[in-house]
Image (tube, rainbow, N blue to C red):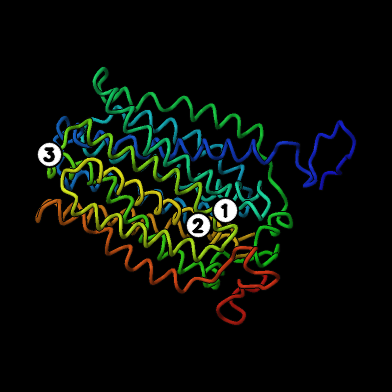
Amino acid sequence: MIPVVTNANDTVDRSGRPKGYEWKAVTLLSLGLGLVGVDRFIIVPMMPVLARDLGLDYQDLGIITGALAVAWGLSSLFTGNLSDRFGFKKIIVPALFIFSLIAGFSGLATGIVTLVLARVAMGLAEGAFTPASIIATMDASPPKRHGLNVGIQQTMPALLGLGLAPLAVTQLLKVVNWPWIFLMVAVPGLIVAYLLHRVLEQPVPAEIATHSTTHDAGTHRWYEVFAYRNVPLAILCQLFWLTCIIVVAALFPSYLVDHLHLSMDQMGLILSSMGFGGAIGALLLPALSDRVGRKPVMLLSAVLAFGAFWIFGGAGANVTVLFLCMMVAMGSLYALLTLTVGPITAESVPARLMATGSGMVIGIGEVFGGGFAPAIAGTIAKHYGIEHAAAVPLYALGLGIVVILLLKETAPIRLRGKTVAEPIAAGGAHVG
């Protein structure tokens, strides 16, 4: 630990970090994850245009979306453990650099094959970045601000990727061709990667252990992460939340334009509510969980999302109602994502399994919820009508509510000295 000087010229804070480290690290990590959201979701409002120019159908749109999610998931499964072994900084910086470049190259796609290949490559890099960046954010934060700061980080993909991107893209399409829009997104990522290289610090495991309910800094085998009850339950939760978000991203633009016969501008406006709602939900609800607990906030969020999708399905072409419903639904879903991959998982396991646990939750959830779900929903839309695929989120949320009830609480304010992260089987999480 770096000694703390207590005069007026202090250059470190009481945690031994350089002064201002928390806000600098959280800001840059949030911008990095925000660019992940931009690179991932910038394709959403372009789906009808891509379908026209590249000859794609609903099933193709589901495959394109699912391919990135599967690659993202497989990458997260392996690189989370690498982050725990070698340090999150060695994963975060190169991953951000690589996926920024590949996102720009997506504009060179000429058909379904090249577009899928570009999205797969981008998903591999983004899958490496995400779990490591979440643990780095928690490490930069005191435990009492885990929910708040991870929420700030998770706000950015929603705000930038789902909020501002649809508005910007629908306007840019009026003046430039869609390949140029992809090429515009590379430069900001390269800048943030450089700044993270300069700012980010890698602590020792003993320091990271203070962010877990186990306070365990020992060495563990990667598979021991499954011995902690919240991890397999969080995987199920992540599968359900991503099913909702990715199905909405892949098919709802076409649902609004083709089924409800809204204009491109109306579609872009409604999609923007996904981002703004997601940003508000990811910021406020996880911060609330620091005060009242993770489980109560997750239950509230799941019920709100279910109700919003229910009303959405019967709203017809009422733009105002569709906008408000999508805002509430995505705000609740982003709060659920934030709590699932961040505090509810990472607080439950030892220090050397935090990125591994988050990576497993993100990875398996992405492969099945983000990868297979939109492909299945796209097939349903193709053969039975897109209005039937739009009901998929209701089933996913209903199952998710049941799983939330089985989770163990991890919020420090609710534990008051209790340890809730014991392995679910005796000897199942021993120090190796």
Q: Residue furthest top?
A: 175
Q: Which residue is mark 1?
A: 147
Please give the count of numbered marks on the rendered protein. Answer: 3
- Determine contact: label 2, label 1, CB under 8 Å: yes
Q: Find residue 205 and report its image quarter.
A: bottom right
User: What residue is drawn where x is 84% and y is 35%?
Assistant: 10
* Mark pair 1, 3: CA separation: 40 Å
Closest to the observer, 25 or 92? 25
| Disc 2 crowd, CA 10 A, few/some/many (<14, 14-19, 20+) | many
* Mark pair 3, 2: CA separation: 36 Å
Q: Secondary structure at mark 1?
A: helix
User: What residue is drawn where x is 24% and y is 20%?
Assistant: 174
Q: Which residue is mark 2?
A: 339
Q: Which residue is mark 3?
A: 261
User: What residue is drawn where x is 55% and y is 67%?
Assistant: 225
Q: Position of residue 220 (x, y in %)?
A: 63, 66
